Image (cartoon, helix red, strand yellow):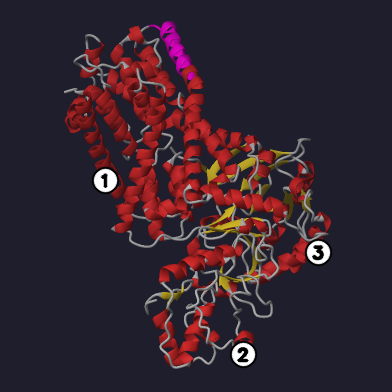
Amino acid sequence: MNPDDHVCLCFRVSQRKLVNFMERERPRVASQLSECLGAGTGCQWCVPFLRKLHAQWERGEVPQLTVAPAEYAARRSQYRSSGIRPDPAPSEIDASAPSDVAVETESQYHSGRESMPGRTDPSQPVRVPLTQLRRGQRAIVDCSELTDLPEGDRCLLHAMGMHHECEVRVCRPGTPCIVQIDNTRLGISGDVARKIFVTPIADSPGSSGAPETRA
Amino acid sequence: MTSGTTVPGAGGRDGIPRIAVLGNPNTGKTTLFNRLCGMRARTANFPGSTVEGRIGTHRAPDGRAELQLVDLPGTYSLTIDMPEARVCRDCLSGSLDGIEPNAMLVVVDATNLRRNLQFAAQVLLHRHPAVVALNMWDVARTRTSRVDPAELARRLGCPVVPVSGRSGEGVAALDVALDTVTTLPFESDALIARLQKLPPAEATPAALAAWSANVVRAATTETAAIDEDHGALIDRIDAALTHPLLGIGVFLAIMAALFAAIFLVASVPMDLIDFLFGRVADGVRAALPNGIIADLLADGVLRGIGGVLVFLPQICLLFFLVSLLEDSGYLARAAFAVDRVMRRFGLSGLSFVPLLSSHACALPGIMSTRLIRDDRERLATILVAPFMSCSARLPVYVLLIGILSIGKPAWFAGVAFAGCYALGAAAGLFSALIARRTILRGPARALVLELPPYRRPSIRNAALVTWDRANVFIRNAGTTILAISIVMWWLSAFPRVNGDAHAQQAGSFAGQIGDALQPVFAPLGFDSQLTVGVMTSFMAREVFVSTMGVLAGAGSGADVSDQGVLEQVATMARTDGTPVFNTATSAAALVFFVLAMQCLPTLAVTRRETGSWKWPALQLGWMTIVAYGAAFITYTVVCMATGVH
């Protein structure tokens, strides 16, 4: 991966930005990398890679991922459609990185193999853009984050029933994103849906891998 | 063609209570309104706004009370900055001239109470007696959660009547409730009691939602459980219909089927109308002594009206089928399917609805662009809306395609018809792209739309919409077009020239005007008669057919007067005896009519909506250039291909 390749594809955070962030902010744990433009807070595919970068930096090495960007992106989409992390190439995850318990418990992240987006610890809610849920998944909307949207869109969404902390079910992920609130279905174009942040509900049928999403 | 009349200042007859009907979109408000008023309703533009609504009268079955109902546009909130919300606000506060309501009927969807009650709360804060209609009760009853209307009434402080606009269930009870609130004095105690139950006007969206959730919890006996299997099936259908490829494919297939149906089904009543008007004109001619009066009635009036009314079946069918599509819940999905395509042209799925309605008439289309929240995108949509093939072009298409497809296989007309629509749409989209790249730069705005549930469309609703639109069309045919027809007859019948019909035509005012302007249109292959037709259709393009009908009537003499209008026009001859409509000329005229800006009302509405003469001038200039250029190319190409000239 080159310095300008994106490590966090959800929020387009490049490796260079992450390295600069570590040099400047000197994060004590890997989870603090989320403060660098929200890296790792989207689909969470990149979390193990962020951890590797952080470990390399802590050891005084030049933080560098060896995986090819195309393969990286392909495996991420596989992960996102199946919810299962494809087995990493040996070089990819740093074996020497300490599997430090501190990171595991302190962090809002979960190790890739154990977690799938949506199946999160309810005590540690993870907010993701609406577009990144899977079909059938349920989530709680966080309207405090709608400030990115133009006033008109925001008022319309409120009036259409999308208020703070309402529950949505994703009927069609992606663009357009179709969600159901109560008995209303709303079609939301991707530009808006990307700016709506939600907390997936842990035990929703979609997140536990309902058959339809696996098919 | 205007889409409606303005609400009269004083409203209906004195002493009739007026009830404002309000509700969220997709609550079945219009279905309920139709159930109450039926055919006793008309479309109206509210004063000082371009939003359409309907006004109707309702009489209880026992004839006891007569009410005037004002169907206000559906809106999600009274406080948002959208034209629909503004009209509702103004109406309730009494500042909408002439339709100050005495009472309010709030229509809520019983299957979607939580959101609907938020709107109801905003409405109920206004100081009018109110009734809440718990609509879609027939569906809600089958759900696992049961709503208790009595408890809801207690919580809202006004009567709540479960009804079903579709089945008519509960309408009798609604009659009684409306009668009660409009006849009994509205006591301030009742209003104060109601206001105390409601969240204050300045409540935040979250507080309003919390209040609503609380009321729903109190008034329902079980929590709503969404039918998962059913939901999953609809998810799949939604995903397919909004799919970038499949969705567009389905959309194109549905549109093709729509136009095929219009073309095939409408031909029977069209032939009938054509035949009947021909017969009546003959009868008039036979009954009256030969002379100016008989000529005026038979050639000016009857042929003029007949030439326009003949297209009523197609217009009715178009509105009927589009209304069915809208009612079925498909159109909202189609907007998302085409959103991606529209985006390439700098527009969004929001522009899709105005552009689609412009296929009926550009006026309501341009008016509905107020839904577009981005100014530049809205201007671009207004600019290109008249490119869409409106129903006024239909008569011209039918005439010219009818002429072009003589001796061609049956599918030719269908393809040519679809081609006209495609050409108009393509010219519009490319013009929008050019505008968005030059004078109206900016990103396309995002689309947020409710996707109403799929349901069996209501034939009754569609029939009423059709009736309404047909009325508007006939009113126009009966006034503007008739007037222009008579003027055209006069221009072609005077000054009286001795000699045969051709001499009369050449010597008449119409012939003189045609001769004077003909050089301009000569490169398109238009002769002087066709030039007259094009010039008269500048103000309203549908006049073209009646003008040609009148010119043909005057030009061909009495020996062919038993022919239908279409046939008569098709066989019109030039002064040298060759047909006016040869293949190249017909094709060029068709292309010209697809693209030309020939509608005075549209220019006026564009001026009103944009607040400047700059935009209508640009519209007129650009469309004329495009139409003339494309018609010239068509004429040249067809001439070369057919070896004529």
Kind of residue at disc 3: Ala
Q: Nearer the viewer, mark 2 or mark 1?
A: 2
Q: Is residue A92 left or right of residue A143?
A: left
Give the Cα distance between marks 2 and 3: 47 Å
Q: Are marks 1 and 3 on the same chain?
A: yes
Given the image, what chain letter belongs to the residue carrying mark 1? B
Q: Nearer the viewer, mark 1 or mark 3?
A: 3
Any part of residue B218 in sight: yes
Q: Residues within 10 Å of mark 2 (few under 14, many from 20)?
A: few
Where is residue B204 drawn, in percent x and y?
Answer: 63, 72
Considering only vertical position in the picture, is B220 above or below B57?
A: below
- Mark 3 lies on a secondary structure that is helix
Look at the image and say whether residue B298 sits in the magenta stretch. Answer: no
Kind of residue at disc 2: Ala
Residue denoted by label 3? B218
Q: Which mark is residue B621?
A: 1
Looking at the image, which is closer to me, B249 or B219? B249
Question: Which residue range is magenta in the image?
Answer: B273-289
Magenta stretch, main secondary structure class: helix
Which quadrant of the figure contains the N terminus of chain A? bottom left
Q: Residues within 10 Å of mark 3 (few under 14, many from 20)?
A: some
Q: Is residue A105 left or right of residue B381?
A: right
Where is residue A199 drawn, in percent x and y?
Answer: 62, 72
Give the Cα distance between marks 1 and 3: 62 Å
